[in-house]
Image (spheres, rainbow, N blue to C red):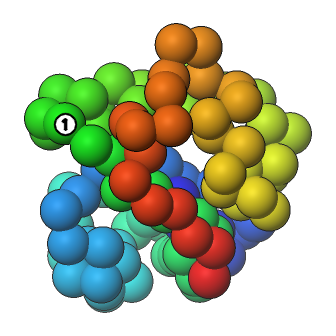
């Protein structure tokens, strides 16, 4: 989850966070949103166990959350375990704020 220059939180999925963050900052990624509102920092990140499909489902769930819930996740990424129904502790390998 990236915090953008306009204060919004952008959610995406990648297997290389540093590379993808730099692409967003340079405006070279596929995201039209971050070309308009450049990210200023990584607000939170999670490493999801399982397939890429599992990570994409998690991304979709987070994108559907309201701003207040996303801000809570940015403040404490471990809350994802409490917020997402049916997720087990073993589904999230690690989480971090920056």
Q: How many marks?
A: 1
Going 52% across and 62% down the picture, which residue do you hit?
Answer: 95
Q: Is residue 27 visible?
A: no
Task: Classify 33 as above or below 17.
Answer: above
Between residue 27 and residue 15, name the one nearer to us.
15
The residue most toward the front is 90
Residue 84, how many percent across, how many down? 60, 23
Q: Is residue 66 left or right of residue 11?
A: right
Residue for point 38% across, 53% down: 93
Q: Residue at x 51, y 37 (%)?
A: 89
At which x and y percent is residue 39? 53, 75
The image shows residue 8 at horizontal and vertical percentages of 69, 57
Q: Residues within 10 Å of mark 1 (few under 14, many from 20)?
A: few
Residue 13 visible here: yes
Q: Furthest-left residue in view?
A: 51
Q: 86 or 11, which is in the foreground?
A: 86
Q: Position of residue 36 (x, y in %)?
A: 48, 65
Residue 29 position by quadrant: bottom left
**Residue that mark 1 sits on:** 50
* Image quadrant where residue 40 sits: bottom right
15 in relation to 71, above or below:
below
Which residue corresponds to the image point at 63% horizontal and 73% vertical from the top-left?
97
Q: Quadrant of the C terminus?
A: bottom right
Helix, strand or loop at disc 1? loop
């Amino acid at each position: 989850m990236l915090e953008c220059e306009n204060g919004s939180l952008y959610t995406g999925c990648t297997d290389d966070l540093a590379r993808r963050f730099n692409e967003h900052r340079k405006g070279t990624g596929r995201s039209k949103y971050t070309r308009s509102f450049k990210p200023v920092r990584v607000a939170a990140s999670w490493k999801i166990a399982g397939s890429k499909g599992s990570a994409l489902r998690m991304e979709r769930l987070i994108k559907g959350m309201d701003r207040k819930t996303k801000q809570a996740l940015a403040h404490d990424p471990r809350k994802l375990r409490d917020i997402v129904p049916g997720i087990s502790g073993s589904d999230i390998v690690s989480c971090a704020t920056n």
